[in-house]
Image (tube, rainbow, N blue to C red):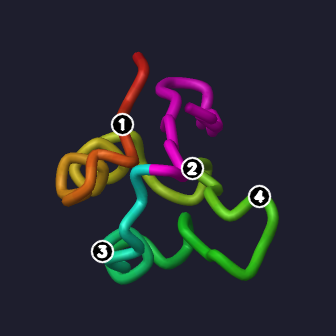
Amino acid sequence: MDTKEYSNGEITILWKAEKCIHSGICVKTLPKVYNPKERPWIKPENATTAALIDQVSKCPSGALSIKK
């Protein structure tokens, strides 16, 4: 399974593309972090660590997770 990592220097967001159901919760919750039209599409430096942890916990598919 291909996992991509995106870090803000404190935590790392792990994204498993195969698990993603594209619910859009990430984009709606933190649009400055998640932009599917850009590369990289996840820019964790655009939110606080607390906001990232909160948002990732709401991912319904488990495609997003946190590595501390």
Residue 68 on the magenta segment: no
Q: Label 1 is placed on what type of residue?
A: Ser
**Which portion, as a residue range, is magenta?**
1-18
**Residue 65's spot in the image, x, y percent?**
36, 36
Between 6 and 20, the one lying in front of the other is 20
Q: Name the residue under label 2.
A: 44
Figure disc tally:
4
**Contact? badges 4 and 2 (CB < 8 Å):** no
**Residue at (61% x, 26% y) in the render:** 9
Lower sequence index among marks 3 and 1: 3
**Residue at (37% x, 79% y) in the render:** 24
In screen coordinates, is 66 left or right of 2? left
Lower sequence index among marks 3 and 4: 3
**Residue at (73% x, 81% y) in the render:** 37
Q: Give the CA distance from mark 1 to mark 2.
A: 13 Å
Assess disc 1: are there few (<14), some (14-19) or many (≥20) residues with their C-alpha within 10 Å of its C-alpha: some
Assess disc 2: are there few (<14), some (14-19) or many (≥20) residues with their C-alpha within 10 Å of its C-alpha: many
| 42, above or below 32, in the image | above
- Which numbered marker is on residue 40? 4
In screen coordinates, is 53 left or right of 40? left
Q: Label 4 is placed on what type of residue?
A: Pro
Assess disc 3: are there few (<14), some (14-19) or many (≥20) residues with their C-alpha within 10 Å of its C-alpha: some
- Which numbered marker is on residue 25? 3
**Residue 35's spot in the image, x, y percent?**
62, 75
**Contact? badges 1 and 2 (CB < 8 Å):** no
Lower sequence index among marks 1 and 2: 2
